Amino acid sequence: MGTSGVGASSSPCSTSAAQNTYSTPAYGSGSSGSGWSGSPYNSCVQQCMASWGQQAMTSPPTTTTATASAGSGMTHTVIVAPTQGILRYVPFVVNASVGDTIQFVWNANNHTVTKSSQLAICNKTMDAPFASGQQNKSFVFTQMVNTTNTTFYYCATPGHCPKGMFGIINPPNAAMGSNTSLSGMMPAMAANSSSMAAMWNYTQMMTQNNTVATTWGGNIDMSGMPQWAHQYVAENVMYSRTFLAANPETLNADGSVNLSTSDSTPLMMPGDITAVANSNSSSSAGSGSVSPSNSSPSSSGSNPYPTMTNHARKVGSSSIVAGVTVAIIVALAL
């Protein structure tokens, strides 16, 4: 598979010393934007950004670490749930070569890393399976890459995968901007959903000073993925883009992600991208305005505005930077 867009890092990658170790069989894993502007939701999103402000940094407890078999090549770190309640793997996609190691680092409780497949993303596969079991914050799970075939994995905690908690190693690629690529499909997805439009505009504004972050993941080929997963692929890519824009030192010029710098520079963890969509949906309902989409998802909970959770942490070292949660009521007027 091609490696454009998101690729394996050529610079040193993060590693973690084991405190409690175990071995699991090596697995065969697998290979991975365009702008959309002019939305009437720009002012809404800009107010969200202004109200939420800068993310906070704090400092840390000890890591509980475990390792499995490791390869002889690069180590690629994937964060399992950036903060409690954010159902994402970061980065969403990783390009890895045979002999590389994928290191999954838990930053929140009650999550798994379980191998699945493209057609059954939320179901455990029996084809060279791997599964971490449900683990908590500070846990580390490693797997060695034995093939460059595309590999999907997901969180098997009930309800998490259907909300988008899955990731891809060596995702299928399409030409950037082509009909089956994420970058080619995104304008139509945004035009058909006010929530998607709000998330897309917010992502564009957050990444506007970082060209690599703006286009990251845009060449993922969507043609073989289930229709229900398209929305969540887009959300995961957008969240990864906001993370990379907030932590530009982790993003290489070729689009690969290197989290080794977190040993010296704590990472900024953005609030979930869906907070923007929920805020937009609630504001539209409250004002009685008509959205330019076919439908808009209803908000949940008594508070119609999003809550931003800001965490910072070190990944791939023996310490984790503890998080601080800042809840701010965002006043929006459409």
Image: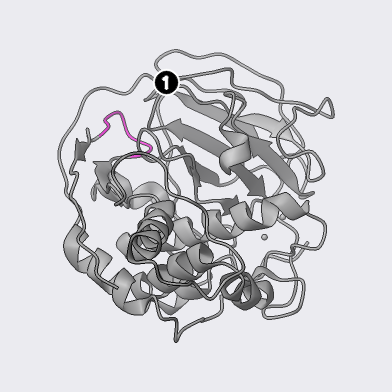
Question: Residue 292: x percent and y percent?
Answer: 53, 76
Secondary structure of the residue carrying numbered label 1 = loop
Q: Is residue 10 above or below residue 191?
A: above
In the picture, residue 82 is in which quadrant? Answer: top left
Q: Is residue 112 left or right of residue 222?
A: left
Q: Which residue is depicted at the point 45% across and 33% down?
A: 105
Question: Residue 65: x percent and y percent?
Answer: 41, 21
Q: Which residue is depicted at the point 52% across and 23% down?
A: 67
Q: Is residue 201 left or right of residue 53?
A: right
Viewer-side residue, 244 vs 44: 44
Q: Magenta span has 319?
A: yes
Viewer-side residue, 99 vs 235: 235
Q: Which residues are magenta?
A: 315-320
In the picture, residue 117 is in which quadrant? Answer: top right
Q: Magenta span has 96?
A: no
Q: Is residue 45 above or below residue 110?
A: below
Which amino acid lies under the numbered mark 1 shown in the image of this protein? Asn
